[in-house]
Amino acid sequence: MRLPNLVSQLQGSNRRSIGQSNQVVRLVRTQPKLFRELIACLWSENAVLRSGAADAAEKVSRDNPRLLDRCKSQLLGLLAEIDQIELRWHLAQMIPRLTLTPPERKRAAAALPRYLDDRSSIVRTFALQALVDLSRNDTALLHESKQLLETALLSGTPAMKARAR
């Protein structure tokens, strides 16, 4: 299957629609070489396509996180620049799955606090989780993540409080 077929399967009716994302997930799991084509859709000008691609990429990376490593630099760049809610929450889930060097982990941890101010509770919750996950491999981030957890317990959304506990 080539990119145009992935694109057509990922089209949905709105940004919350994932199109035929689950079919794309099954396809990419059996043909991992398609993962790069899936990731390329994250830069589409079509917000609906980006949402479906982010959903599929996140699901594929749950089982095979090493696929993300091939796109590490691009994903870290996207993490720092994207404003679309659906991409933010999926990136926040995927970034801790990357095999990161200390400078890369620092780069990711520097981008994520901006997500904590997002209007979406889902984005804020996944950003909090991502920062804690990143701190597990970096003692320099541990103190900051503990402070974020304490703040979330006191003043976060119900989802953030539950995640912080």
Image (cartoon, rainbow, N blue to C red):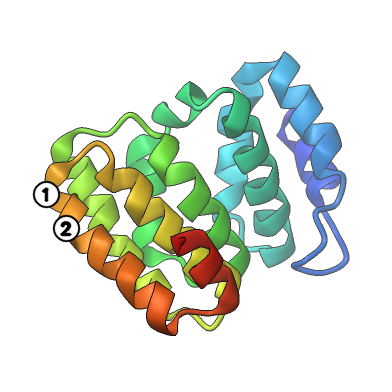
The residue pinned by badge 2 equals 143
Examine the rendered structure and indicate whether residue 134 appears above or below residue 78: above
Q: Which residue appears at 32% of the width and 40% of the height?
A: 73
Examine the rendered structure and indicate whether residue 52 appears above or below residue 82: above
Q: Which residue appears at 26% of the width and 46% of the height?
A: 135
Q: Let me know if residue 1 appears in the view.
A: no
Q: Is mark 2 on a helix, strand or loop?
A: helix
Q: In the picture provided, is 144 more to the left or to the right than 51?
A: left
- Identify the image quadrant of the N terminus: top right
Contact, CB < 8 Å: mark 1 with mark 2? Answer: yes
Q: Which residue appears at 40% of the width and 74% of the height?
A: 152
Q: How many marks do you count on the picture? A: 2
Name the amino acid type tagged 1: Ala
The residue pinned by badge 1 equals 140
Query: Which mark is in front, 1 or 2?
Result: 2
Q: In the picture provided, is 31 more to the left or to the right than 114?
A: right
Q: Is mark 1 on a helix, strand or loop?
A: helix
Q: Which residue appears at 34% of the width and 73% of the height?
A: 114
Name the amino acid type tagged 2: His
